[in-house]
Amino acid sequence: MGNKIEKDKDTIQQMVTLYCRHKLNMPKPDEQYQKLISYCCLRLDKCKWGENKMACKNCPVHCYKPEMREQIRRVMRWAGPRMLFYKPIAAIKHLLGK
């Protein structure tokens, strides 16, 4: 897919890495969190809206398995506000893209 999907994938990677490093004190995402990143990227690749996709939380079609949806929600809830401190340029670009 195109540019927006790739940016969303990058944002997910950054958020999961931030969560693992600073919340869970892991040097990098372990196997469980690598699977989460892969799952999210797969869902983005298969998004029926493509480049016109909205934020997943606003989407009428919930394509994530419930347990994966809860796991990424937990990560985003923690990492989202902290992106401004740890990854300010990425956070601002993400906010402006919405």
Image (spheres, rainbow, N blue to C red):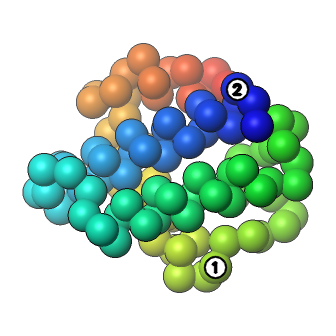
Q: Is residue 5 left or right of residue 9?
A: right
Q: Where is residue 39 in the image (x, y as percent from the top left)?
A: 55, 64
For mark 1, does the 10 Å Cα neighbourhood hold few (<14), some (14 to 19), or many (20 or more) residues? few
Q: Name the residue under label 2.
A: 3
For mark 2, does the 10 Å Cα neighbourhood hold few (<14), some (14 to 19), or many (20 or more) residues? few
Q: In this view, does 24 lie to the left or right of 79?
A: left
Q: Which residue is drawn at 62% across and 34% down?
A: 6
- The extreme top residue here reads 89
Mark 2: which secondary structure? helix
Q: Which residue is drawn at 53% across and 74% down?
A: 68
- Which callout, 2 or 1, points at the residue further toward the start of the chain? 2
Q: Which residue is nearer to you in this view: 58 or 3?
A: 3
Amino acid type at circle 2 is Asn
Q: Where is residue 15 in the image (x, y as percent from the top left)?
A: 39, 45
Q: Residue at x 76, y 70 (%)?
A: 62
Query: Which quarter of the picture shows residue 64?
Result: bottom right
- Residue 65 is labelled as 1
Q: Where is residue 78 in the image (x, y as percent from the top left)?
A: 36, 54
Image quarter (top left, top right, bottom left or bottom right) of the C terminus: top right
Mark 1: which secondary structure? loop
Q: Are marks 2 and 1 in contact (CB under 8 Å)?
A: no
